């Protein structure tokens, strides 16, 4: 993951706007290299690699499956 300030310009394509989010997320985009970018309402951005995003999904899946088995 990489945090970018609100002053950093990044070419990106809109995937979708977040309508109701208590954590300040504004929209989700993809960059020119197709990496996911989370844009916050304060103008900052977090860029993910696909590997990081997949790892987070695997961790979440394993946690959810473990909770179901309990």
Image: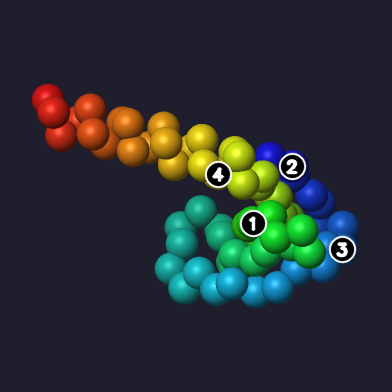
Gap in angstroms between the C-alphas marked 1 and 2: 11 Å
Please tell me whether mark 4 sits on a helix, a strand or a loop.
helix
Q: How many marks?
A: 4
Gap in angstroms between the C-alphas marked 2 and 3: 14 Å
State the image coordinates of residue 21 (x, y, percent, origin top left).
46, 62
State the image coordinates of residue 62 (x, y, percent, origin top left).
32, 31
Which callout, 1 or 3, points at the residue further toward the start of the chain? Answer: 3
Please tell me whether mark 2 sits on a helix, a strand or a loop.
strand
Going by the image, does 57 lie left or right of 36? left
State the image coordinates of residue 47 (x, y, percent, origin top left).
70, 50
Q: Which mark is residue 36?
A: 1
From the image, tell me which residue sits under label 3.
9
Gap in angstroms between the C-alphas marked 4 and 3: 22 Å
Is any part of residue 15 visible from this angle? yes
Local crowd size for mark 1, using a 10 Å CA cut-off: few (<14), some (14–19), many (≥20): many
Q: Nearer the viewer, mark 4 or mark 2?
A: 4
Q: Which mark is residue 2?
A: 2
Circle 2/circle 3 CB separation < 8 Å = no
């Amino acid at each position: 993951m990489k945090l970018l300030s609100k002053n950093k310009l990044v070419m990106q394509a809109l995937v979708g706007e977040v309508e109701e989010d208590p954590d300040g997320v504004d929209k989700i985009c993809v960059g020119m290299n197709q990496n996911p970018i989370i844009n916050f309402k304060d103008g900052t951005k977090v860029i993910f690699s696909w590997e990081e995003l997949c790892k987070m999904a695997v961790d979440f899946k394993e946690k959810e499956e473990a909770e179901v088995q309990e």
